[in-house]
Image: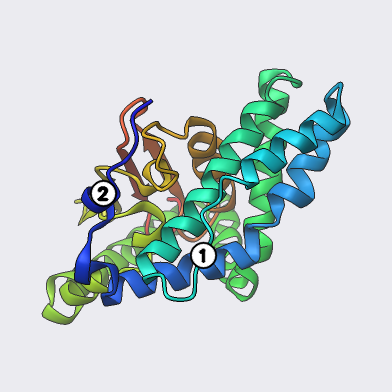
Amino acid sequence: MATVNLDEEFGSGWSKWNLQAWVDFFVIRTMMGRVGDVIPKTYVPILRLVAEDGAKVDDEYHQLVALRDPVRLFDSPRDKWRKLYGSYVRELDWVYDELRKYFPKHEYQDLVVDIMARTIKDALGAMLPTVEKGTRRAAERDRDPNIARRKSNPVARWLAHQGEKMMVGAPGRWLMAHANPMNGIIGPADMKFLPDGNMEIYIPRCWMHTAPGDGRTQDQACLWGCKGACEEVFGPESIAPMYFEPHLPDFSCTLTVKLGGAG
């Protein structure tokens, strides 16, 4: 199996220590502190319950954990990021692959997506009222379709206009190029605002696939731990619905964000 050339994929020299590398490391360290335990504390115990040999599950999981690269004090922030994120994605993809052996397709998908979505919602914490605000507004639109035309579309256009101004301006361009908080999860991406007021993010080579370093796409983690769970959290009734289009077996993906909520 091919492996990832780490220097070509994630940079070398100064790029391992620049501002974006530090942002990526802190984003992933925070993310792991909030969602990392879902594998050993939820998914693996479920796997032990449904598998014929729980001890074998423990042994295989421990072997997988042993593959983790130790995070050392003097590692660059880029190397710390890669070790933390790569191990998490590798282990998530493994446990999903194992779980789908024991459940019908739709039950498996519902199970892993629901668990991850709940975990993400808990991790969002104080941000949840913003999401709930979008849910209440969507319910209001359902009662009166005219409200959608009066409120949703202008809001979406205003958000798109403000976002586009931020990205087009020099400070915005600099921040997106050097301190993009999404970079640590998806890697470099091209963002643009569409005529309908939505935002499209094209990810040419998602780091969720490449961080484990094994040269393959992390299909189950991608489809259900990322796409399925995020679309559940940021669904049609949220303030910013998200729609992922992974281009498997390619490493790329297209994400569409409906600014201003569903309309």
Crowd band around label 2 with a 10 angstrom C-alpha radius: few (<14), some (14–19), many (20+)? some
Q: Is residue 185 visible?
A: yes
**Residue at image coords 65%, 48%:** 116
Can you give x and y, in whole percent of width and height, for residue 205 in the image? 28, 43
Answer with the quarter of the image where residue 184 lies: bottom left
**Residue at image coords 50%, 34%:** 223
**Residue at image coords 75%, 21%:** 103
**Residue at image coords 34%, 58%:** 153
> For the residue labelled by badge 1, is the local secondary structure a helix, a strand or a loop?
loop
Q: Which residue is mark 1?
A: 71
The quarter of the image holding the N terminus is top left
Can you give x and y, in whole percent of width and height, for residue 130 in the image? 55, 70
Q: Is residue 150 visible?
A: no
Horizontal relation, residue 92 to residue 8: left or right: right
Q: Amino acid at mark 2?
A: Glu
Q: Is residue 26 above or below residue 236?
A: below
